[in-house]
Amino acid sequence: MEIHWYLDGTLLSLDGATSVSIASLALPLGTYSLSVSVVDPTDWVRDEHARETTMTQTLSWPVHIDELLCEGDITGDGIVDISDLLVVINQWGACAGCVADIDGNNVVNVNDLLIVINAWGVCPS
Ligand SMILES: [Ca+2]
Ligand SMILES: [Ca+2]
């Protein structure tokens, strides 16, 4: 099967992936449309119209990003506190894919620290 993912109609470089982590897309605040198209690429199909109508399935989901209000809550417990700060300190430096890399630039540095400090306290609900 060919699997293609789209965000607002733009092809994502995730071909073949069977799932998508919304967080990994690092989207700014807003509402988006996430779609996946699955196509049976069998080469014995001579009628491409038939492939599109009967051998292709597309699903779409609305994605609403509003978590930036509390993006400093690394531990996910609803409050930004010393436990989140300690995660930042423990993962300080070059760190691809680390949870403390809040802004997603593959390094845990003062920018991520400031996000935690600015979000300090109970998360808005
Ligand atoms: Ca926390
Ligand atoms: Ca970072």
Image (cartoon, rainbow, N blue to C red):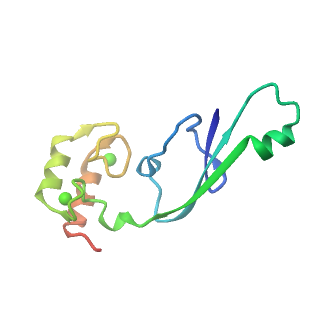
- Give the quadrant of the N terminus: top right
Seen at 47% across and 49% down, the residue is 25
Placement of the C terminus among the 4 image quadrants = bottom left
Q: Percent from the top left, x then y, of residue 103?
A: 36, 52
Q: Specify whether 115 is left or right of 80.
A: right
Tell which residue pokes out farthest to the left in this image. 82
Q: Position of residue 115 (x, y in %)?
A: 27, 59
Q: Residue at x 41, y 51 (%)?
A: 23
Left or right placement of residue 28 versus residue 50 in this view: left
Residue that lies at the very extreme toward the front in this rendered image: 54
At horizontal 20% and vertical 48% (from top left) the residue drawn is 88
Task: Count the marks.
Answer: 0
Extreme-right residue of the structure: 47
Residue under the point 26% across and 59% down: 72
On the image, the x and y values in percent for residue 10 come to 65, 50
Across and down, in percent, residue 67 comes to 37, 64
Q: Quadrant of residue 118?
A: bottom left
Examine the rendered structure and indicate whether residue 1 appears above or below residue 85. Answer: above
Indicate left or right for 65 with 97 as reference. Answer: right
Decide which of 11, 62 is in the foreground and name it.
62
Residue at the bottom extreme?
Answer: 125
Question: To which quarter of the image does residue 44 belong?
Answer: top right
